[in-house]
Image (cartoon, grey):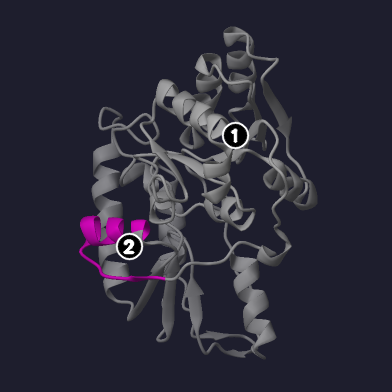
Amino acid sequence: MASHLINALHAHGHQAELVTMPFRFGLHTVRAAMHAWAREQFDRFDWGGIDRVFSLKFPCFYLQHPNHVVWLMHQHRSVYELFNTPYGESAQTPGAAEIRAEIIERDTRALGAVQNIYTISARVSERMRRYNGVNSTPIYQPPANAEHFFCADSLDYIFFPSRLETLKRQELLIRAMARCRAPVAAIIAGDGGGGLALTRLVEELKVGDRVRLIGRIGDDEMRIWYAKALGVFFGPYDEDYGFITLEAMLSGKPVITCTDAGGPLEFVLDGETGIVAAPEPDAIADAIEWLHANREKARDM
């Protein structure tokens, strides 16, 4: 997102630089990043003045600049909507509730001081309004190289490219394949910290003949997998936005998502551009079987 924004600014004749600092996700190391960004005065560097600053992530929007624009990917999710869920911090962890309260208070103050606040989706705007009382405007970013996606005749597999982590819920698709009666395979692309657990789950459920974990792939190969899929599964938990939804649609494929998926629900219309199913293996298996049995309707989607 940052590199594409910079490329767009360059294309319009502006000078632009990407500025980053390390971020550590530990509960007690977050404060260090917050303090570091809050100390930053971005109105001037040694080589001259800065006309405008765009902040994209927590906690860089703590910086100081008179012409500060926020285009927010998301806040520190583990203490917001993921708090007290299997995916975020727990109130039982010593100090977690206190740090959560501090982050929400400082976020509210910092964001309230910015005149122009945008987000990457209506879901992210909704969270900011709910937790911080701050209004914002969604601006959807198109996927990279959108013009290169294409549609081909579908083969009997469901495609799911994403980072391998619990929040993306590849586990749901794997468990659905153990229940699916249609002769359809699942192709899961990507790498990440959840890879070993998913490999073990495939072995445990004995679905190695129907589920392939193909690892990280290049953009060209990914577009081919999209183009030939029967459908695309993207059922994360409360996703911010989700390029996968749009990449599937650019490839002319129906999307199976879940009722609690967040961002994808801004695009997937149940029965029209895909299927919105309960986040349960049986419901997802039913959706896959329906696509296989109704190929013409799936193609219309």
Q: Nearer the viewer, residue 99 or 278?
A: 278
* Residue 251 placement, left or right of 24: right
- The image quadrant of residue 228 is top right
Question: What residue is disc 2 on?
Answer: 125
- Which amino acid type is marked by label 1? Leu
Question: What residue is disc 1 on?
Answer: 164
Question: Label 2, label 1: how many angstroms apart (C-alpha)?
Answer: 26 Å
Give the residue drawn at x 55%, y 54%: 243
Q: Where is residue 143 shown, x and y percent of the image? A: 60, 61
Residue 126 in the magenta stretch? The answer is yes
Q: Secondary structure at mark 1?
A: loop
Q: How would you rate the neighbour count of disc 2 (Cα within 10 Å): few for under 14, some for 14-19, many for 20 or more?
A: many
Secondary structure of the magenta portion, mostly?
helix
Give the residue drawn at x 43%, y 47%: 239
Q: Nearer the viewer, residue 298 or 278?
A: 298
Q: Where is residue 263 shown, x and y percent of the image? A: 41, 52
Q: Which residues are magenta?
A: 123-138
- Which amino acid type is marked by label 2? Ser
- Quarter holding the N terminus? bottom right
